Image: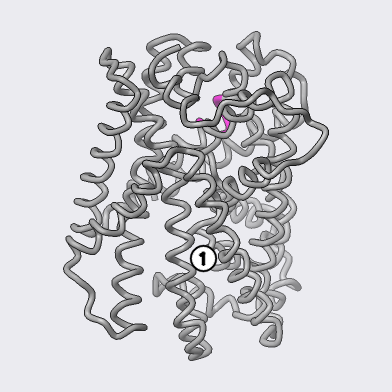
Amino acid sequence: MNDQAKSVDQRFDAAAPAELSSWNRQDTTWMLGLFGTAIGAGTLFLPINAGLGGFWPLVILTLLAFPMTFYAHRGLTRFVLSGREGADITDVVEEHFGIKAGALITLLYFFAIFPILLIYSVGLTNTVASFLEHQLHITPPPRVILSFVLILGLLAVVRCGEQAIVKAMSLMVYPFIVALLFLAVYLIPHWNGGILATASQVPAPSALLHTLWLAIPVMVFSFNHSPIISAFAVDQKRRYGANADQRSSQILCRAHLLMVVMVLFFVFSCVLTLSPEQLAEAKAQNLSILSYLANHFSNPTIAFAAPLIAFVAISKSFLGHYIGASEGLKGLIVKSGKRPGAKALDRIVAAFMLVICWIVATLNPSILGMIETIGGPVIAAILFLMPMYAIRKVPAMARYRGQASNVFVTAVGLVSISALVYKLAM
């Protein structure tokens, strides 16, 4: 076992494999940690992006939301579980596909996740600076200082280990769930039909398929938590041994049900309040749904709460994506032939993340959205296609062959990648 795998194992308390007879606190912590990674700042734009397609595409996307997210992430979890004890996703790729393929996938995995971490660094700095200036009426400190303090604070949580990250994220999920519920319920008296105005206009099959084709990636990545799946699978295998697949599937199922129910209730509450024209206006202004609602109702409570909710959403997503980004960077360092000790490797990665995130957050570049879009097809390939290919080719995953969900996941993956490439070419 290499130093990277050892470092992962050392972050978790040693314990004998648990029985499946009872759901425990650790299972709940992971369920909320998965929820926390997936449901972040992107959720605040989902009502706009999903609602613009009209009523019937949104209904279809609602029906597809759970199977799209559950089967894909279950496949990636099973892929990591198929490796040797303590092996993370970068090790399992090398184990199944060879050293060269392992190095390539590790490189792509890192460069698909790391730009998202940079985007969260910028978003966090902008959110806090705006909150200080507009809500608290305090002149924010220089951006170079503010960004350093914020990122250093999050990395202080990171330094406590992966278990501390997951626990912190699970705690941050509670106020986020309460906030989403509060906003969704607050809007109920203001429901005026909104998107229902388009329900009588059944689109032509070709138009419907085109709308769904472009909208599926939006739904997929609104619930994406692939960066934390590797650490999740490693911990499940250590805790449950041969029963890891069954228990991880149970945790994933509950996490995805929570995601889908909570987020779609919020989405429908928003699109039943705002007309398609207002959603288009919000998109044109590049505002999150919270900012648009605050302006729409001139409500000081929403105006004050919106940046706080965004801060929690971005912070917990930053922590979840850090796990995946650091895992990829450690894999690149190890595969380059350099094998520092576990503690030295942690320090090198943390220092690199701090410096790069700090520089980018200070510079506040506008190109990051394009970088995220470019990383989208890579994430879709790793999340959807790689596990399905492994099921076909790897003997350790042969028992999963012949399932209808494999065809479904492959189809969604191809649709997502083709739509993302099409958007890039436009």
Residues drawn in magenta: 382-386
Residue 216 visible = no
Pinpoint residue 369: horizontal percent, then vertical percent: 35, 54
At x 35%, y 26%, the residue is 330
- Above or below, 205 against 13 in this view is below
In magenta stretch: residue 387? no
Foreground: 317 or 54? 317
Q: Quick one: SS at disc 1?
A: helix
At x 70%, y 40%, the residue is 251
Dividing the image into 4 quarters, which one contains the N terminus?
top left
Residue position marked by numbered label 1 in the rendering: 44
At x 56%, y 64%, the residue is 176
Relative to 222, 308 lies left or right: left
- Above or below, 163 against 207 in this view is above
Residue 102 visible = yes
Relative to 340, 414 lies left or right: right
Pinpoint residue 45: horizontal percent, then vertical percent: 50, 64
Say how the picture is coloured: one colour
Pinpoint residue 425: horizontal percent, then vertical percent: 38, 45
Is most of the magenta stretch helix, strand or loop? helix
At x 44%, y 20%, the residue is 6
Which of the 4 image quarters holds residue 343? top left
Q: Characterize the local packing of mark 1: few (<14), some (14-19) or many (20 or more) Cα atoms within 10 angstroms.
A: many
Pinpoint residue 289: horizontal percent, then vertical percent: 51, 72
- Give the residue type at disc 1: Leu
Foreground: 418 or 295? 295
Which of the 4 image quarters holds residue 415? top right
